[in-house]
C-alpha cells in the first residue's frame, strides 16, 4: 500500500492561525470533492476557528477516564476504519492519555500515514525536539511535549504560517487567542515582542535549513556540481594573519546586502600541520566570526587555492573573500602570482573579492633615505644586465658586422649602457661603459683583436662614450633619490595623519599611538611609563638589556617613551617629536576625561544634595511644625483643654511624628542604597505571603486590589522585609494613580529561573522618555502634593530590588496604564 503524504503547518507561537489554515484547506479540499475528515481539532474557544469546523465531516472522539476525570482523545481506530483520503490532525506534539495505543499523537499520525491516508497537521516551533532548549532560553518556559526532528523533516510538505509579532500581540489583546483573564499574563510573559520576534526567526531559519538540506540532497542525487545562487553564501579565507578581522567584516557586509545571506570562514591547514599560523589570532577571529553570526571551518590541504575552491563549492558558495598578498613585490616576482590569481582562475562561477588591508606587502614602516638612492637589488640587477646583455649584444653585432656598420655598433652599445644605467644606476653603468668600450676597441675598431687605438679620434669617442654613460646614470640616480624622498614624505604624512586621527579615539588613543610608533620606526618594542614607573602602554617585546632611546613627555616630565631597537636618524627624531607631542596631548586628554568624570559625579551628588535640602525644607517642615504645635498646645493649655481637644492634639502629634519617622527612615535607607552598604538578609520567601502582608499594611480591600497569585510558584530568594517595602511602595503608587472603580491587579508567575511579581494599573502611565526619572531620588514627576512624601519610594524600591539580586522595571499596560515588574531569582532547593 502506498504511504500517505504528510503536510505540516509550522507556527512560531500559539495564535498565528495554524488550525485556521488547516480547516480552510480542509474546506477547500471538500469543495473539490476530496474525502476529508477532521480526526481531531482544538478550537480553544475561538469563534472564528469553531465556525470553520461546521460543515466538515468529523470522526467522533473517544472518551477515556483518567484519575476520575473524563478526557477525550482522537479515535485512531475510527479514523482508520473511516479511511478518508485526507485526515486533519491538530497539535502533532500532543501527549495521549495513558492507556492509548501510542504515547504521542505523532505516533498516531505515523500509523495513519502507513494506512495510505494523507494527513494535514499543525505544530509550533517550540515543540521541535532540537529547538526545545533554544526556546527555553528565549522564553524561560520548558516545553514537555516535543516532536522528533526526523518526523517533521520527513514531511512531504512543510509550510510556515507566519504572522508579524505585533499583529499577534494585537490579536491577543483583542481577546481572539486567550480569554480575558489570561491576556495580561500572556502579553507580559511568553508573548513579549522580543520573544515572538525570536521565535518567528527561529521558525523561518529552521524551514530555510530544511529547504537547504533538500536542495543539497537533490544536487547530490542529480550530480550537479555548479553553483546555484539560491541565496548568498560568502566564504572568507583566513590565514591566521592580522588581516583576518578586516576580511571577516568585509565578508559580513557582503552577506548582509542580501536577505538570508550566510557567512562562513575557512582556514586551510597543511597535512603535516607545519604551516605557519598564529593560534591566538585564529582563536580571536573565530570569536569574531561567531559574533557576526557566521560559522568557522577548518580544512586540511597542501594546495591552498584548490582547497579553498573545493570548500566553497561544497557549501554552494556564491562569493569568496581573500586578502591581497602580504608578500613584497620582489618576492612576488620571484615566487609567482600567488594564491589570489590561482583562486580566480579556478573559481569558475564563484565571485572572488580580493580585499586590500594594512598588512598587504608587509607591515607599515617608514622607508629609509640613508645609503644609496637605488636599492641593492636594483644595483645587482644592473650588473646582471651588463654581464648578460654585453656578451649577447657583442655576438649579434659581430656575426652581422660590415665595414660600414661601426656607427650602428657604437649606438647599440650606447643603448645597452643607457639600459644598464636605468636599471642599476651609476656603478653598473660605468662598468658597462668601460666593458663595452674595450669590446668595441678589441673586436670592431682597427686594428682588430688588439686593445690599441691608432686614431686619436677613436680615443676621444671612447671618452665621450663613458661621459655620456656617467651622465645618464647620474640622472637616474638623482631621480631615484628624489623618488625615495617623496616616498618618505608621503609615508611621514600618512603617519602624521594617523597619529592625529588617533587623538580622536579617546581612551584608545595612547595604545594606538604606541603601536603605530613601533611599526613606523621598526622597533622591537615601545613602552610608555609614568613618572612613578607605572607602565601606561606597551607594544611589542622590549629587549632585556638597557639599550633603548628614552624621551621625556611633558614639562615637567610626566611620562617617558622608551623605544627598544635600532638608533634613529635626524629625520626620524624630528618625526618622533611630533608623535611625542601628540602623546602628551592624548595623556592630557585622558586626565581631563578623568577630571570631568569626577566633576560629573560631584555635580550629581550636589544635585542630590540640593534636592534633599529642597525636599527637607518642604516635606519635613510640615509634620515637624504640626508635632511641635500639638505638643506645645498640650503643655501650655493643659488645664483648659477638653478631653476631645486633648485627644485631637495627641492624634496630630502622633500622626506627625509617625510621618516624620517614616521620612527620616526613607532618607537613611536611600543614603545606604547610594553608598552600597544596604544590609540584606536573603532566604526563601513565599511571594504570596509578602503580597498579602503589603495589601493588609495599606488597608486595601477587594474593590481596590485584584489578586492573581500563582499557587505553584516556588519560593523566591529575597529579604522579606525589603521585599514587603518594595511591594508597599509600588502598590501604593499604583493605587494612587488608578482611576476610581478600577482595581490594581497584582499577579505572580514564573519565568525560567526567576519569579515575576507584576503590579498593573490602568492610570495615565509614564512616557518612555521619563521612565528613568521615576527612579531618581526626590522625584515626583510634577506631583506637587507634598503630603505624598519625599519622592523616594521608587528609588528605594529599585535599590532594594537590585540589592536582593533582582530588578524593578516599568512596562506599558495593554489598554493604557503602567505595569511595574518586580523580578527576583527563585530560591535554590
Image (cartoon, helix red, strand yellow):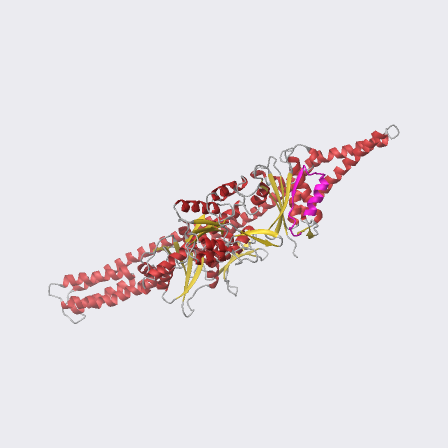
**Is residue 805 shown in magenta?**
no
Name the foreground residue: 220 vs 491. 220
Q: Quadrant of the C terminus?
A: bottom right
Query: In this rendering, would 223 be left or right of 774?
Result: left
Q: Quadrant of the N terminus?
A: bottom left
Above or below, 565 against 605 in this view is below
Name the foreground residue: 286 vs 210. 210
Q: Residue furthest left?
A: 403
Where are the magenta residues, as a range?
A: 688-715
Q: Residue furthest bottom?
A: 449
Quadrant in the rendering for residue 470: bottom left
Above or below, 406 against 804 in this view is below
| Number of disc labels | 0
Query: In this rendering, would 660 be left or right of 228?
Result: right
Q: Is residue 521 visible?
A: no
Residue 122 x %, y %: 48, 50
Q: Is residue 261 visible?
A: yes
Query: In this rendering, would 692 be left or right of 358?
Result: right
Residue 696 x %, y %: 72, 41
Q: Residue furthest front?
A: 81
Residue 68 x %, y %: 62, 53
**Is residue 691 shown in magenta?**
yes
Residue 64 x %, y %: 57, 53
Above or below, 438 against 743 in this view is below
Name the foreground residue: 577 vs 98. 98
Q: Residue furthest right?
A: 639
Query: In this rendering, would 731 be left or right of 239?
Result: right
Amino acid at each position: 500500500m502506498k504511504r500517505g503524504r504528510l503536510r505540516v503547518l509550522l507556527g512560531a507561537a500559539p495564535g498565528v492561525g495554524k488550525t485556521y489554515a488547516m480547516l480552510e484547506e480542509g474546506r477547500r479540499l471538500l469543495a473539490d470533492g476530496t474525502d476529508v475528515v477532521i480526526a481531531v481539532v482544538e478550537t480553544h474557544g475561538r469563534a472564528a476557528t469553531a465556525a470553520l469546523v461546521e460543515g466538515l465531516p468529523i470522526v467522533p472522539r473517544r472518551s477515556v477516564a483518567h484519575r476520575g476525570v473524563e478526557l477525550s482523545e482522537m479515535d485512531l481506530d475510527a479514523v482508520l476504519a473511516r479511511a478518508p483520503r485526507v485526515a486533519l490532525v491538530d497539535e502533532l506534539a500532543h501527549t495521549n492519555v495513558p492507556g492509548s495505543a501510542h504515547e504521542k499523537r505523532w505516533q498516531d499520525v505515523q500509523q495513519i500515514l502507513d494506512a495510505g491516508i494523507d494527513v494535514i497537521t499543525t505544530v509550533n516551533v517550540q515543540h521541535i525536539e532540537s529547538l526545545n532548549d533554544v526556546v527555553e532560553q528565549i522564553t524561560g518556559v520548558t516545553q514537555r511535549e516535543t516532536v522528533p526532528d526526523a518526523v517533521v523533516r520527513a514531511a512531504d510538505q512543510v509550510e510556515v504560517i507566519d504572522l508579524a509579532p505585533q499583529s499577534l500581540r494585537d490579536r491577543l489583546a483583542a481577546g481572539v487567542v486567550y480569554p480575558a483573564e489570561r491576556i495580561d499574563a500572556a502579553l507580559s510573559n511568553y508573548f513579549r515582542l522580543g520573544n515572538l520576534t525570536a521565535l518567528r526567526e527561529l521558525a523561518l531559519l529552521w524551514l530555510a535549513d530544511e529547504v537547504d538540506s533538500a536542495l543539497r540532497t537533490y544536487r547530490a542525487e542529480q550530480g550537479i556540481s555548479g553553483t546555484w545562487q539560491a541565496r548568498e553564501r560568502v566564504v572568507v579565507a583566513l590565514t591566521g594573519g592580522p588581516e583576518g578581522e578586516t576580511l571577516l567584516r568585509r565578508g559580513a557586509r557582503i552577506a548582509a546586502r542580501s536577505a538570508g545571506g550566510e557567512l562562513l570562514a575557512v582556514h586551510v591547514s597543511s597535512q603535516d600541520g607545519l604551516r605557519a599560523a598564529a593560534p591566538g589570532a585564529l582563536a580571536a577571529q573565530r570569536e569574531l566570526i561567531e559574533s557576526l553570526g557566521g560559522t568557522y571551518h577548518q580544512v586540511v590541504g597542501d594546495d591552498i587555492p584548490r582547497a579553498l575552491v573545493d570548500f566553497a563549492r561544497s557549501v554552494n558558495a556564491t562569493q569568496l573573500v581573500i586578502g591581497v598578498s602580504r608578500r613584497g613585490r620582489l618576492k612576488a616576482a620571484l615566487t609567482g602570482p600567488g594564491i589570489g590569481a590561482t583562486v580566480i582562475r579556478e573559481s569558475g562561477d564563484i565571485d572572488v573579492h580580493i580585499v586590500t588591508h594594512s598588512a598587504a606587502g608587509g607591515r607599515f614602516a617608514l622607508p629609509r633615505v640613508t645609503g644609496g638612492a637605488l636599492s641593492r637589488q636594483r644595483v645587482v640587477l644592473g650588473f646582471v644586465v651588463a654581464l648578460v646583455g654585453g656578451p649577447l649584444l657583442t655576438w649579434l653585432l659581430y656575426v652581422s658586422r660590415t665595414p660600414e656598420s661601426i656607427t650602428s655598433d657604437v649606438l647599440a652599445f650606447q643603448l645597452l649602457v643607457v639600459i644598464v644605467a636605468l636599471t642599476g644606476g651609476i656603478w653598473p653603468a660605468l662598468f658597462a661603459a668601460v666593458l663595452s668600450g674595450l669590446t668595441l676597441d678589441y673586436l670592431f675598431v682597427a686594428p682588430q683583436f688588439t686593445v690599441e687605438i691608432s686614431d686619436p679620434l677613436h680615443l676621444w669617442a671612447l671618452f665621450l662614450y663613458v661621459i655620456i654613460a656617467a651622465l645618464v646614470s647620474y640622472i637616474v640616480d638623482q631621480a631615484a633619490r628624489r623618488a625615495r624622498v617623496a616616498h618618505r614624505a608621503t609615508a611621514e604624512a600618512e603617519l602624521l595623519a594617523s597619529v592625529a586621527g588617533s587623538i580622536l579615539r579617546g581612551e584608545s588613543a595612547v595604545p594606538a599611538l604606541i603601536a603605530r610608533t613601533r611599526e613606523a620606526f621598526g622597533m622591537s618594542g615601545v613602552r610608555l611609563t609614568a613618572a612613578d614607573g607605572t607602565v601606561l602602554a606597551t607594544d611589542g617585546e622590549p629587549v632585556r638589556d638597557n639599550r633603548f632611546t628614552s624621551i621625556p613627555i611633558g614639562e615637567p616630565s610626566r611620562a617617558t617613551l622608551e623605544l627598544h631597537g635600532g638608533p634613529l636618524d635626524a629625520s626620524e627624531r624630528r618625526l618622533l617629536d611630533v608623535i611625542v607631542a601628540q602623546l602628551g596631548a592624548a595623556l592630557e586628554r585622558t586626565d581631563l576625561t578623568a577630571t570631568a568624570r569626577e566633576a560629573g559625579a560631584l555635580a550629581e551628588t550636589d544635585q542630590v544634595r540640593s534636592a534633599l535640602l529642597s525636599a527637607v525644607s518642604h516635606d519635613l517642615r510640615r509634620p515637624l511644625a504640626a508635632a511641635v504645635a500639638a505638643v506645645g498646645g498640650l503643655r501650655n493649655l493643659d488645664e483648659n483643654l477638653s478631653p476631645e481637644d486633648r485627644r485631637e492634639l495627641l492624634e496630630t502629634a502622633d500622626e506627625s511624628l509617625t510621618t516624620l519617622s517614616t521620612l527620616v527612615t526613607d532618607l537613611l535607607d536611600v543614603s545606604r542604597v547610594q553608598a552600597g552598604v544596604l544590609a540584606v538578609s536573603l532566604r526563601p520567601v513565599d511571594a504570596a505571603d509578602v503580597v498579602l502582608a503589603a495589601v493588609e499594611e495599606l488597608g486595601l480591600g477587594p474593590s481596590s486590589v485584584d489578586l492573581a497569585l500563582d499557587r505553584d510558584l516556588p519560593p523566591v530568594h529575597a529579604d522579606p522585609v525589603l521585599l514587603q517595602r518594595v511591594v508597599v511602595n509600588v502598590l501604593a503608587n499604583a493605587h494612587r494613580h488608578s482611576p476610581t472603580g478600577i482595581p490594581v491587579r497584582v499577579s505572580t508567575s514564573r519565568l525560567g529561573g526567576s519569579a515575576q511579581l507584576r503590579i498593573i494599573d490602568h492610570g495615565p502611565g509614564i512616557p518612555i522618555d521619563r521612565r528613568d526619572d521615576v527612579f531618581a531620588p526626590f522625584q515626583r514627576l510634577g506631583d506637587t502634593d507634598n503630603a505624598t512624601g519625599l519622592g523616594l519610594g521608587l528609588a528605594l524600591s529599585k535599590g532594594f530590588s537590585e540589592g536582593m539580586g533582582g530588578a524593578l522595571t516599568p512596562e506599558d499596560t495593554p489598554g493604557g496604564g503602567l505595569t511595574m515588574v518586580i523580578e527576583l531569582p527563585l530560591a535554590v532547593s
